[in-house]
Image: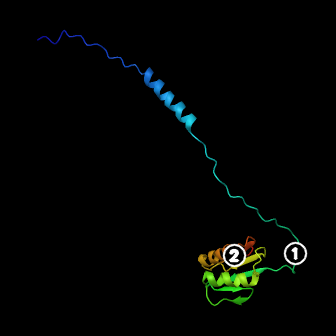
Amino acid sequence: MNFRNATTEELDLNVTPLIDVVFLLLIFFMVSTTFQKETRLQLQLPQASDQKADPASHTIEVVINSGGMFFINGRELSDSRIATVRRAINKLARGNKDIPLLIRADAMAPHQSVITAMDAAGQLGMVKFSLSAAQSD
């Protein structure tokens, strides 16, 4: 057997059909893809003014001390449970959901206490509440 005289042919791989298939897949995915618009929160930000607030307007003030105790319009609540906070706010609001609610928390107050006050207001359907902070120098 003489293997030395055997001629080897060069293999030629034609990639043109492969490129055609890739482009067809690309076009297919571009056409069939649906673009989804992400939902965004719609916020109405409060307007600041230099005028003093009307003293006749009724405001519910929730104060949270550094120990996490609640004071609503100056009266201390018996405990810090959300049901107690909700009941006290509802009693003062008399079912009116448009009464402004001001939450004033000590800088060292537990974060959970602030969330409890906000959650209680949200469960009552109150939409006008704000957080108070001291102005830094």
Residue at 66% across / 74% down in the picture?
Answer: 123
Residue at 78% across / 73% down in the picture?
Answer: 98
Q: Outermost residue, front direction?
A: 95
- Taking depth in this image into account, of 37 and 111 the one nearest to the observer is 37
Looking at the image, residue 50 sits to the left or right of residue 124; the answer is right
- Residue occupied by mark 2: 124
Residue at 76% across / 82% down in the picture?
Answer: 94
With respect to residue 60, does 125 lie above or below?
Answer: above
The quarter of the picture where the C terminus appears is bottom right
Q: Outermost residue, left direction?
A: 1
Looking at the image, residue 52 sits to the left or right of residue 135; the answer is right
With respect to residue 124, does 71 lie above or below?
Answer: below
Element at badge 1?
loop
The crowd level at tag 1 (other Cα within 10 Å; few <14, some 14-19, many 20+) is few
Distance, label 1 to label 2, CA atoms, is 28 Å
Can the viewer see residue 136?
A: no
Element at badge 2?
loop
Look at the numbered discs 1 and 2 and tell me whether their residues touch, using CB distance below 8 Å.
Answer: no
- In the rendered image, residue 116, in percent from the top left (x then y), is placed at 62, 77
- In the rendered image, residue 23, in percent from the top left (x then y), is placed at 50, 28
Kind of residue at badge 2:
Leu
The quarter of the picture where the N terminus appears is top left
Kind of residue at badge 1:
Lys
- Residue occupied by mark 1: 52
